[in-house]
Amino acid sequence: MILEDVIALKKCIDEYRQSMYQLAKKKGISDPNVIQISQQLDRKIIVLQKIICDF
């Protein structure tokens, strides 16, 4: 179960990262949408780190 959660979270992180990269290329890194995606990405990474530390 934990492995499935980690895999799903990793996929989500990769998708956020790709979206952020593409949007930043078009609009710049200070665009509010890029910042919002970055913050969401940060939260997902923190969740993944907690799972890894607890394991």
Image: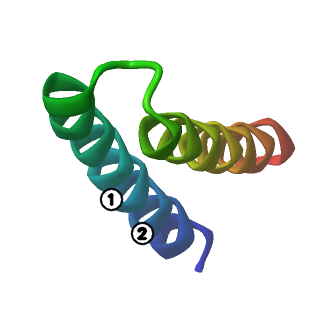
Q: Mark 2 = which residue?
A: 8
| Discs 2, 1 touching: Cβ within 8 Å | yes
Q: Quadrant of residue 49?
A: top right
Give the residue type that dot 2 points to. Ala
| SS at mark 1 in the image | helix
Q: Is residue 22 left or right of residue 11?
A: left
Residue at the right extreme, as displayed: 54
Q: Mark 1 = which residue?
A: 11
Q: Is residue 43 left or right of residue 40?
A: right
- Label 2: few (<14), some or many (≥20) within 10 Å? few
Q: Quadrant of residue 46?
A: top right
Q: How is the image coloured?
A: rainbow
Give the residue type that dot 1 points to. Lys
| SS at mark 2 in the image | helix
Is 17 placed above or below 2 here? above
Q: Quadrant of the N terminus?
A: bottom right
Q: Residue at x 80, y 43 (%)?
A: 50
Q: Which mark is residue 37?
A: none
- Label 1: few (<14), some or many (≥20) within 10 Å? few
x, y percent for residue 5: 55, 71
Q: Quadrant of residue 53?
A: top right
Q: Residue at x 15, y 24 (%)?
A: 25
- The CA distance from mark 2 to mark 1 is 5 Å
Front residue (pair 43, 10): 43
Front residue (pair 16, 30): 30
x, y percent for residue 4: 47, 74
Is 10 placed above or below 27 here? below
Q: Is residue 23 left or right of residue 34?
A: left
Q: Is residue 50 left or right of residue 7?
A: right
Front residue (pair 16, 2): 16
x, y percent for residue 42: 63, 36
